[in-house]
Amino acid sequence: MILPFYKFGYFNDEVSLIIAVLIGIGFGFTLERGGFGNSRILAAQFYFTNMRVFKVMFTAIVTAMLGVFYLSVIGIVDLSLVYISDTFLLPQIVGGLLLGIGFVIGGYCPGTSVVSASTGRFDGMVYIAGVFFGVFVFGEMFPLFEDFFYSTNMGKVTLPGLLDLPYGVVVFAVVLMALAGFIGAEKVEKYMATKKGAN
């Protein structure tokens, strides 16, 4: 096992921060090149007229999943050392709903808003200002809902562990789900294009 590098102590905190910044720059560049700095493209996802976000993000998830899984199979990655956050079920469901509502209203998620603002788009800058304001309000009001924030702690949960299935079976199922999703997304886009043309 040689990965993950940080857990095996191959570099220190300072180097890890430099690597994180470089990865962040690369990720932001890729998002912008994919058109994800444009709120119209992102918002089109919710109208089923442009499913690019779904396709790209699901492709990234599946690619990363397959890479990590096969690297663990051949003995390069130690999955037990890969960091997993604890699952706080109800707070994370509520947080996901709030993020989704904000995504629909503003056309951005936090990451894509930074990409948008960095390219000079005013709506992205406004969105980031809203993010900072929200963080400030959250911090000030945190004592009021701290108990809820830490409720329903399920510990470190993975799908293989939750379903009591081997990693390979879950990976295969997710790949099949992705393929079905891609086919469905193509059909939805074609249907919406036909419907728009008919109008």
Image (cartoon, rainbow, N blue to C red):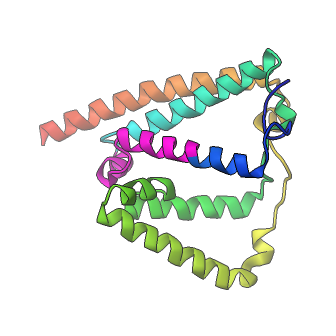
> Looking at this rendering, what residue extends furthest in the top direction?
74
Q: Is residue 152 above or below residue 115?
A: below
Residue ID at (60%, 58%):
96
Say which quarter of the image contains residue 10: top right
Say which quarter of the image contains residue 2: top right
Give the camera-side residue of 18 and 83: 18
Give the camera-side residue of 195 and 71: 71
Q: Is residue 49 above or below residue 67?
A: below
The quarter in which the C terminus is drawn is: top left
* Magenta-span inclusion, residue 107: no
Q: Is residue 5 above or below residue 32?
A: above
Q: Is residue 119 above or below residue 63?
A: below
Residue ID at (59%, 21%):
176
* Magenta-span inclusion, residue 43: yes
Say which quarter of the image contains residue 73: top right
Q: Position of residue 106 (x, y in %)?
A: 38, 63
Q: Position of residue 151 (x, y in %)?
A: 81, 67
Give the camera-side residue of 174 and 134: 134
In this image, 107 relative to 132: left or right?
left
Q: Is residue 164 among the parts visible in the rendering?
A: yes
Q: Which residues are magenta?
A: 22-47
Residue ID at (82%, 39%):
162
Q: Main secondary structure of the magenta part?
A: helix
In this image, 31 relative to 12: left or right?
left
Residue ID at (74%, 20%):
71
Q: Is residue 107 among the parts visible in the rendering?
A: no
Q: Position of residue 75 (x, y in %)?
A: 83, 18
The quarter in which the N terminus is drawn is: top right
